Image (cartoon, rainbow, N blue to C red):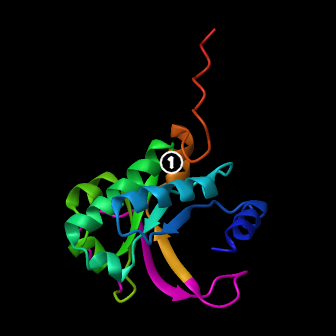
Amino acid sequence: DPMFESHYKGARAEGIPCGAYWYLDALTVEDAKKEADAFLQRLAGKQFEYPVFLDLENEAQFRLGKDKVSALIRAFLQKVESAGYWVGLYGNLSSLTYYTDDDIKKRYSIWLAQWDASKPTYGGAYGIWQHAVGKADGIAGDCDLDYCYIDYPTQIKAKGLNGYGAPKPPEPDS
């Protein structure tokens, strides 16, 4: 995203908590790891109060089948998580149901995109629901609208993830 740096700086200046995502193009595990490295370079030196997500929407990946798609997801998320980030997977009802192994959905945060329902019909756990496209103050044009059900900022900061560093130990009682 050519606007990533500008959007990040603008959100920080306004005190808006941030997350980030990477749209995966990789068709091999090796390329997924290379894209994870590129994502980590973009994240370096920044802090994120929300998870950093892998965005999986590429039809060419889905044609590989569930086992290979799940291998791509694991390779990417494991690499980013091992660098100290709270990671998650962004996907729609179809990609999460038919192309993502259950262990991934249980292990990582899920950001569910499902706009065609008044409430999600996805049967698994999710922390964020992208429910519609609409308007938001300060944004020209339409944007995605989401509900978040987990206090990620508190948990991420407490664990020292996403650029926040290790939490300080409590002061000893005197």
Q: Nearer the viewer, residue 133 or 73?
A: 73
Task: Name, please, the residue furthest toward the top.
Answer: 174
In the rendered image, residue 129 lying in the magenta stretch gets the answer: yes
Location of residue 92 with respect to 54 vertically, above or below: below
Q: Identify the secondary structure beneath mark 1.
A: loop
Q: Nearer the viewer, residue 75 or 123?
A: 75
Dividing the picture into quarters, in which one does residue 72 lie? bottom left
> What percent of the width, then of the height, locates residue 45?
68, 48
Dividing the picture into quarters, in which one does residue 130 lie? bottom left
Q: Looking at the image, how many numbered discs can be counted on the residues?
A: 1
x 37%, y 73%: residue: 91
Location of residue 153 with respect to 4 vertically, above or below: above
Q: Which residue range is magenta in the image?
A: 118-143
x 34%, y 59%: residue: 29
> What percent of the width, then of the height, locates residue 83?
50, 43
x 66%, y 91%: residue: 141
In the rendered image, residue 170 lying in the magenta stretch gets the answer: no
